[in-house]
Image (cartoon, rainbow, N blue to C red):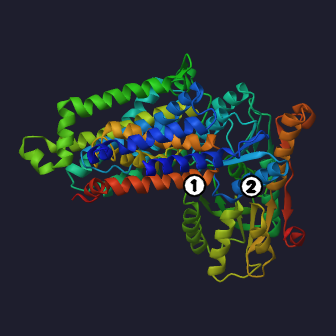
Amino acid sequence: MIPKHAIEKYGTLFAGLVLFAFLMVFAENFASTANLLNVLKQVSFLMVLSIGFTFALIASELDLSFANVCSLSAVVIGSLMQAAYPWPLAVSAGLAMGLFAGLLNGYLVTYLKVPSLISTLGTASVANGLAFMITGGVAFVGRWDPDFLFLGRGKIGPVPVIILFTLAIVALSFFLSTQTKTGIHLQATGENEEAARRSGINTRKSKILGLALSGLAAGLTAVFLVANLSSAAPQMAGDFLLNGIAATLLGMTMFTPAKPNILGTIVGALIIVVLSNGLVLLGAQYYIQDIMLGIIIVASVAVSASVLKRAAFAL
Amino acid sequence: MNRFKTLMGAAAVLGAALISGQAAAFDLGIVAFQMSAETHARCSNTAEARAKEFGWDTQVLNSNGSLQTHAEQIENLIQKKVDGMVLCMSKPVQFDAQFQDAKDAGIPVITISSGSSPHTLFDVQPNEFVVGAEAAVYLLGTIDFEGGILAQRFESNAGARIRGIMLDVVLAENPTVTVVGSHSMARTKSWQDDVRNGMSALILQKAGQYKGIWASFDGQAFIIDDLLIESGMKKGDVSLVSIDGGQEVFRRIKSPDSMMTATVAVPLEDMATAAVDSMKAIAVDGKKKEEMVAGPYLFKPAILVDANNVDQYLN
């Protein structure tokens, strides 16, 4: 008899492992080294973006701007690459753009007391408008500096370099959220802001940090996206909004149930991308992918709804 | 235990059902960039139907208008080791790395209305420059090369942008025609709203100043047509010309209530059929690519359809 708390903590992980085993048996080529590396490369973008969203949610703030901020950062990078600026400058500008948007969200939420649901929707709209203003709607496309493209397309041996970057980001994020005082303060702020404040935690700082990390992750993802596709378009990260939220919500169904956590988000992102890859290898038609993603979102929201509601409607 | 057995049994049945389609027949992967656009759907559906006539296994995937998703769909099909790929409205520079991987894996790729790439066999397209020029010259002819027009553009899509460029070229040679109002569609996911909002404002603001309206694709023209009907206009009050073709635009050209005057019908069905036929000739029958198509493009001429010949095309 499996204890109830074990099912609550590891049920989704077990389901993910069953999915993995199922695909290993039934989907030809799924377990090949090339495909597993392909999956890890594909999940990198979603994982980095979702980790950022998770940091905001840990501080009990909902960042709905991350996808549009990512697109805006991408466009900033693309515009500088197109204008033949050195790629380190373009990358720095993209990261700065993401960080600035995150800090702006933090300021709106903590100083102007605008609920994050509203403020980040506003930021998302502004970011979208700016991205179109910079591009005029036309994507930046070019055969840019190979050193820059290496960040998204490069390989060390058979391993895409983006996987190594993502592993480093994952390790750093996990360490920050669980092993540092800053991470503990973030969690305390998210769980009970008033109690955290009374115990001496600077909750305003924690909330700003959570949202700033979300913006920074959007900037990082933009670097990888632009380098991978050698282009930058005003809505190039639009699809990540739903998948990013889904990965985080799925993560909230495991390890520390109903609480956003980095490890859960990582597994959540993996499940989504493995499912997407597996369905293609199984020969499923395109609409099946959307249906399956929808089912996952509904199921994970059903489990983690209480925390999401708290984040969405906190005034 | 019984429940576990039932679950495993169901998984095995599902797996068997899913892999039952993975026979030894030629396996064709078809990817539409954005299935919600009628032209993309017509393209991929026709390619699928043609491939099924040959008894091939086909899998249609949708990239939802996302560059990264499109890259991932191609990567997943490479891992699936499909025998060939047909891509509807792809992009050559952005997916350079994926096309190179497909080529390295020995997978032939034919694109439709995408632009040529050194890593694909060829691109099937109507030659957007010719199509754009034909629509523009026709529109100006219907207003006797004099007066004002409204223009509904779409800069984010290469084909639609070229059509707009050709409108400008034709206008440059006919300075007696002026663009009194122009709206550029920015959003791709909620484009219908975007066009409706932009053009309803122009139609009201510029009332009486224009005799013709140019739209970069038929979907935009349908929205404009509905706005003109709502504003009380009658057939012949204004000339509405667009590009793409299909039964809905033919029905409107025929209808006594619609302002739709003409379209340049892009033979998407012919293009998709030619792509699959060429794939069969090259990948199955062993013909050389050069025997099928000399250069990087296989051009399929578009046909101007107006009241004079619409009956030939209306089902």
Q: Which mark is residue B53?
A: none
The residue shown at (84%, 71%) is: B314
- Residue that carries the numbered disc 1 in the rendered image: B188
In-front residue for pair B164/A262: A262
**On the rendered structure, is B225 left or right of B185?**
right
The residue shown at (75%, 80%) is: B235
Considering only vertical position in the picture, is B242 above or below B4?
A: below
Q: Position of residue B195 (x, y in %)?
A: 59, 64
The residue shown at (48%, 32%) is: A224
In-front residue for pair A147/A259: A259
At label 1, counting other C-alpha atoms closer than 10 Å, the crowd grade (few under 14, some 14-19, many 20 or more) is some
Considering only vertical position in the picture, is A306 above or below B259?
A: above
Distance from disc 1 to disc 2, alpha carbons, whole Å, reads 21 Å
Residue at the farthest right position: B291
Residue B94 visible in rendering: no
User: Mark 1 belongs to which subunit?
Assistant: B
The residue type indicated by label 2 comes to Asn
Instruction: Give the foreground label among 1 and 2.
Output: 2
- Residue that carries the numbered disc 2 in the rendered image: B45
Res A103 quadrant in image: top left
